[in-house]
Image (spheres, rainbow, N blue to C red):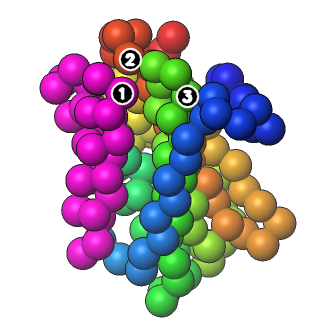
Amino acid sequence: MSQIAGEPGNQDFVEVRLPAAGAYLSVLRTATAGLAARLDFTLDEIEDLRIAVDEACAILLQQAVPGSVLSCVFRLVEDSLEVTVAAPTTDGRAPERDTFAWTVLSALAGKVDSSVADDRTVSISLYKQRGAGPGPA
């Protein structure tokens, strides 16, 4: 994964914070589509990312602290988009990587990772490069 933090002008980012509830996921799907379109992703790539972001959020919402905030950071780097969704959770467990949901994420986004912070905030990061095709890069 390309980390370009600290190099101004090479990376744009957008952060969206909203209630950790399924009713608000359409906002993230729309933001995902708009930002991917800005990078000239194909319609199929845009739809794959929309579905992947939705799936990542669904995984997090299952264990999110009621009434908490879901954050989503979009990083645009040249011809790729990295999306990191995070929420405080009740148990602080990273998503299982041998599940159908994780397989879907990997197939749709290309690269997928997760982490757990000391305060039990779980993050899922998706990384999609334009024109990379489906599956791990």
Residue drawn at x 62%, y 73% is 88
The label number, if any, that marks residue 39 in the structure image: 1
Q: Which residue is mark 3?
A: 77
The label number, if any, that marks residue 130 in the structure image: 2
Count neighbours of disc 2 (C-alpha within 10 A) and say few if under 14, some if 14 to 19, many if 20 or more: some
Q: Are marks 3 and 1 in contact (CB under 8 Å)?
A: no
Judging from the image, what secondary structure is the residue with disc 1 in? loop
The amino acid type, in three-letter code, at marker 1 is Leu
Q: Is residue 87 visible?
A: yes
Q: Nearer the viewer, mark 2 or mark 1?
A: 1
Q: Main secondary structure of the magenta part?
A: helix
Residue drawn at x 21%, y 34% is 47
Q: Are marks 2 and 1 in contact (CB under 8 Å)?
A: yes
Q: Is residue 95 visible?
A: no
Residue drawn at x 42%, y 80% is 19
Q: Which residue is most to the front?
A: 9
Vertical comparison of 98 with 132: above or below? below
Q: Rounded to the nearest whole Å, what is the CA distance between mark 3 and mark 2?
A: 11 Å
Vertical comparison of 30 with 6: above or below? below
